[in-house]
Amino acid sequence: MITVWRIMIAGARNFLRNAWLSTAATAVMTVTLVIILFSFVMSNTLQVAVKTVLNRVDVSIFLTDDVTTDKAKELKAQLEKVDNVQAVQHVSKEDALEIFKRQNRTNKRILETIQDNNISLQASLKVKAKNPSKLQPVADFVNRPDICRAPAIIIRQTVIILPPASL
């Protein structure tokens, strides 16, 4: 106890003996620790942001009206077997319209236009990739002649299905 007391008194005496140097050293150490803490926080925030963006990347394959529900389920099952595919979700025409209405619920004008004109959207298959930077296997699947009548191309890792050329 006496030793701890002596250490405290000596520390206070030395701190007060050269107050400016002690204050400057303490300030420099505090600033250094704040910078290190800020670096760790920003690094973790950036990693979470990148993961969030990568998890939102998906590919939509729009189906024509002549594709039946059974055929869509068959395509879904085949797509789930393709390399780099994590999940496939079938979105029916009705579901697509409900999703569109939900996303635009604040825009009364769009909702009125949809109701007045009896607009329907296309059914689709939403493909979530394990690695969004490697979508070539999905494009290769879509480009098979028995699957697609029009070619699909990849632009910046996004699958785009071109409509058939009209002559």
Image (spheres, rainbow, N blue to C red):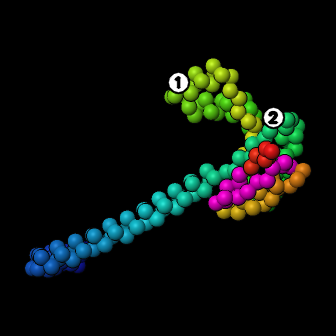
Residue 106 appears at what percent x and percent y? 51, 28
Left-right relation of 129 to 33: right
Identity of the residue furthest to the right in this view: 146
Left-right relation of 167 to 24: right
Query: Where, quadrant-wise, is the C terminus in this rendering?
Result: top right
Name the residue carrying label 2.
65
Q: Residues within 10 Å of mark 2 (few under 14, many from 20)?
A: few
Which sits in the foreground, 67 or 161? 161
Q: Does residue 148 lie above or below 98 as drawn?
A: below
Name the residue carrying label 1.
108
Q: Residue at point 40% right, 67% down?
A: 39
Which sits in the foreground, 117 or 30? 117
Left-right relation of 99 to 149: left
Q: Residue at point 66% right, 22% down?
A: 117
Q: Does residue 16 lie above or below 79 as drawn?
A: below
Instruction: Report the disc number at residue 56.
Output: none
Visible in this render: residue 25?
Answer: yes
Residue 27: in magenta span: no
Label 1 is placed on what type of residue? Lys
Q: Which residues are magenta?
A: 147-160
Identity of the residue furthest to the top in this view: 116
Disc 2, SS = loop
Q: Residue at point 21% right, 77% down?
A: 25
Residue 159: in magenta span: yes
The alpha-carbon separation of the residues under discs 2 and 1 comes to 28 Å
Residue 91 appears at what percent x and percent y? 74, 38
Q: Does residue 57 lie above or below 36 as drawn?
A: above
Q: Residues within 10 Å of mark 1 (few under 14, many from 20)?
A: few
